[in-house]
Image: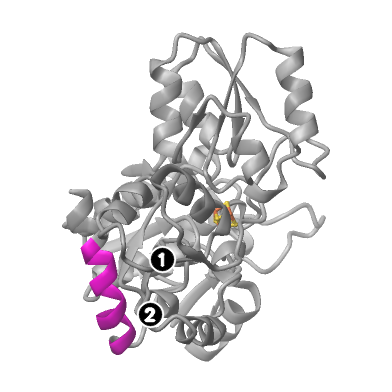
Amino acid sequence: MRILLSTLKNSNNEGYTLENEHFFEMKQEQINQMLEEKGYIDEKISPDLKLRKEINRLRKEKNAVILSHFYVESDLQDIADYVGDSLGLAQAAAETNADMIVFVGVHFMAETAKIINPYKKVILPDLKAGCSLAESAPAEEFAEFKEKYPDHKVITYVNATAALKTMSDIVCTSANAKKIVESFPEDEKLIFAPDKNLGNYINSVTGRNMVLWNGACMVHEKYSVEKIISLMTQYPEAEFIAHPECEKPVLLLAKHIGSTTSLLKYVESSRASKFIVATESGILHQMKKTCPDKIFIPAPSIDSTCGCNDCTFMKLNSLQKLYICMKYEQPEITLAPDVIEKARIPIQRMLEISK
Ligand code: SF4
C-alpha cells in the first residue's frame, strides 16, 4: 500500500509542511505492525489540511456513514451523520445504505456494526479504543461461569465482546434492558452479563433475581457519593440524574435514572434549569446544544481532579485519526464468519424487540 507520511521536519525544526512531505512505500505488514502497536496509522499531516473538509470529501467519495457515540469529543459528535447511544447506533448501523461504516466510539460498538453488516467495511479510528466493561468478561471465564447455570438463559449487555455475544440468548442496551428482561417469563432463570450495576438496577425495577456477572465500567463505578451529596447541598435547586451503570448508592440519590438518550430527553422535558449529571461527560455537549439555557454540572469521581469523568477509551478518537482511517480504510474490524453468525442472532432479537 502506498502511504503518505510527512516524516521530515523543516530546517528550523518547527513542524511539518507540505513542502517536506515524504512519500514512501509502506507494506501492509508494516501497517499491521503499526496498528498492533499504536492502534492507528500514525501519519503526520500538514497543519494546513482542513480536516473537516477532507472528512466530508472522503465521506462522499466512499459513500461512508459516520456514526458517533455521545461520549466522544464534541467535534466528533458534530461531524457525524448520526450521534447516539449504543441502541441508537446499532439501529442506525442496521438501517444504513452506506458502503462503509465509520464507527467513532469503542471497539465492541464497531464489532456490533460489523456483525449486523457482515458484507460492509466497518472501520474504527483507533483499535485501542476498548472498554473496561467489555474486558471485565473474558470469553473463556464466562463460558466456565455459564456452565454452572445450565438451565439459565443469558442476557448480555451490548458492552461486551463479540465472543461473549456468541454465548448469549439476547443482547440488550441500557435503553432497553428492562424491556428485554421483561420479555422473558417471570419464572425464567436468567444470567445478566457483564455489568453487575446495570444488572442490579434491572433486578430492582423488575423484581427478578438474575445471576450477575461481576463486571463494571471504570467510569461509572467511580462516582463519589460524598462529593455528589456535597454538590446537591451546594445547588439544592439542581436535579441529580444518573446512568444505571453507576453503583447503587449513587443511583439511590438520583431523581432520574436512564440511558444517555433517556437522560437527554429528561433534561429537555424537566422544568429544572440545573442538573448534576452522572455519566461520561461527553453527553454534556448534546445537553448544552439541546438546552442552551440550562446548566449542567458533571458529577465528580472519587479520584478526578477535573471534577468530571471521562472515558479514556472514547477519548482516544480524534478528528485526525478519523480522517486517516477514512483515507486508508483502516483499521478495519474483521471477525470470523462463525462468530458473526452466532453473535448476530442475539443482536437481531434485541433489534426486533426494540423496533
Ligand atoms: S464509559 Fe465505561 S462502558 Fe462506556 S466505553 Fe468507556 S469504559 Fe466502556
Q: Amino acid at mark 2?
A: Met
Q: Position of residue 354 (x, y in %)?
A: 23, 50
Numbered range of the magenta stretch: 338-349
Label 2, on which residue?
A: 167
Earlier residue among tags 1 and 2: 1
Q: Position of residue 174 (x, y in %)?
A: 42, 48
The kind of secondary structure element at disc 1 is strand
Q: Residue at x 45, y 37 (%)?
A: 258
Residue 156: mark in rendering: 1
Q: If the image is split into quadrants, where does the N terminus sit?
A: bottom left
Reply above or below: 274 against 107.
Answer: above
Q: Nearer the viewer, residue 62 or 185?
A: 185
Q: Nearer the viewer, residue 84 or 101?
A: 84
The kind of secondary structure element at disc 2 is loop
Q: Amino acid at mark 1?
A: Thr
Reply above or below: 291 against 31.
Answer: above
Reply above or below: 288 against 188.
Answer: above
Describe residue 49's horizontal placement relative to residue 88 as left or right: right
* Residue 345 is a magenta residue: yes
Magenta stretch, main secondary structure class: helix
Q: Position of residue 157 (x, y in %)?
A: 43, 61
**Does the image show residue 315?**
yes
CA–CA distance between discs 1 and 2? 9 Å
Mark 2 neighbour class, 10 Å CA radius: few under 14, some 14 to 19, many 20 or more: many
Callouts 1 and 2 close, C-beta under 8 Å: yes
Q: Is mark 1 within 8 Å of ligand 1?
A: no
Q: Nearer the viewer, residue 288 or 86?
A: 86
Quarter of the rendered image showing ligand 1: bottom right
Reply above or below: 47 against 277.
Answer: below
